[in-house]
Image (cartoon, rainbow, N blue to C red):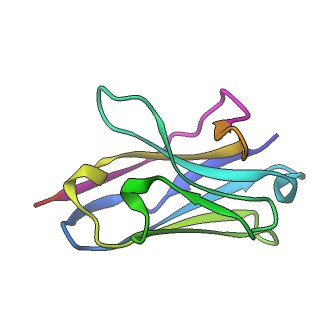
């Protein structure tokens, strides 16, 4: 089972960039596809980006295509989300988790504390 710890959020201005990191403990990390989700207040948690276990396949929510890039390091058990050209609609708490890549759903109902991203105009 993968236990994620997210970091890298902050308060930025529109147009700025942030790089989120997810440290995932668990001996089988490299066996899992991973995803970044986000949840704004009063909204559901959406899958923003996903990466297959080997890193070859990726998925992006239409709203972030061309601006966000997901990557992983299976040696260090890390997943990253590079976020460029941020806009206020990106304001949310961001979470990572192991996923079913085909379904786009988290494998576990256990979530980390997330990392908060706030984008001001």
| Among the 4 quarters of the image, the one containing residue 78 | bottom right
Q: Position of residue 105 (x, y in %)?
A: 65, 36
Which image quadrant: the N terminus? top right
Q: Position of residue 58 (x, y in %)?
A: 64, 63
Which stretch is magenta?
Answer: 106-119
Left or right side of 65 for 110: right
Q: Is residue 10 above or below residue 71?
A: above
In this rendering, the count of numbered labels is: 0
Q: Nearer the viewer, residue 9 or 47?
A: 47
48 falls in the magenta region: no
Q: Position of residue 12 (x, y in %)?
A: 23, 65
Q: Residue at x 81, y 51 (%)?
A: 32
Q: Nearer the viewer, residue 86 or 7?
A: 86
Q: Residue at x 74, y 68 (%)?
A: 55
Left or right side of 34 for 69: left
Q: Residue at x 43, y 64 (%)?
A: 65
């Amino acid at each position: 089972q993968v236990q994620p710890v997210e970091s890298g959020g902050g308060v930025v201005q529109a147009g700025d960039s942030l790089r989120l990191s997810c440290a995932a403990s668990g001996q089988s990390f490299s066996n899992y596809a991973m995803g970044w989700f986000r949840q704004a207040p009063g909204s559901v948690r959406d899958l923003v980006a996903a990466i297959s276990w080997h890193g070859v396949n990726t998925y992006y929510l239409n709203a972030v295509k061309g601006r966000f890039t997901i990557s992983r390091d299976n040696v260090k058990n890390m997943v990253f989300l590079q976020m460029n050209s941020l806009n206020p609609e990106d304001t949310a708490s961001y979470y990572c988790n192991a996923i079913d890549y085909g379904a786009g759903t988290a494998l576990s109902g256990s979530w980390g504390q997330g990392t908060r991203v706030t984008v001001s105009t």
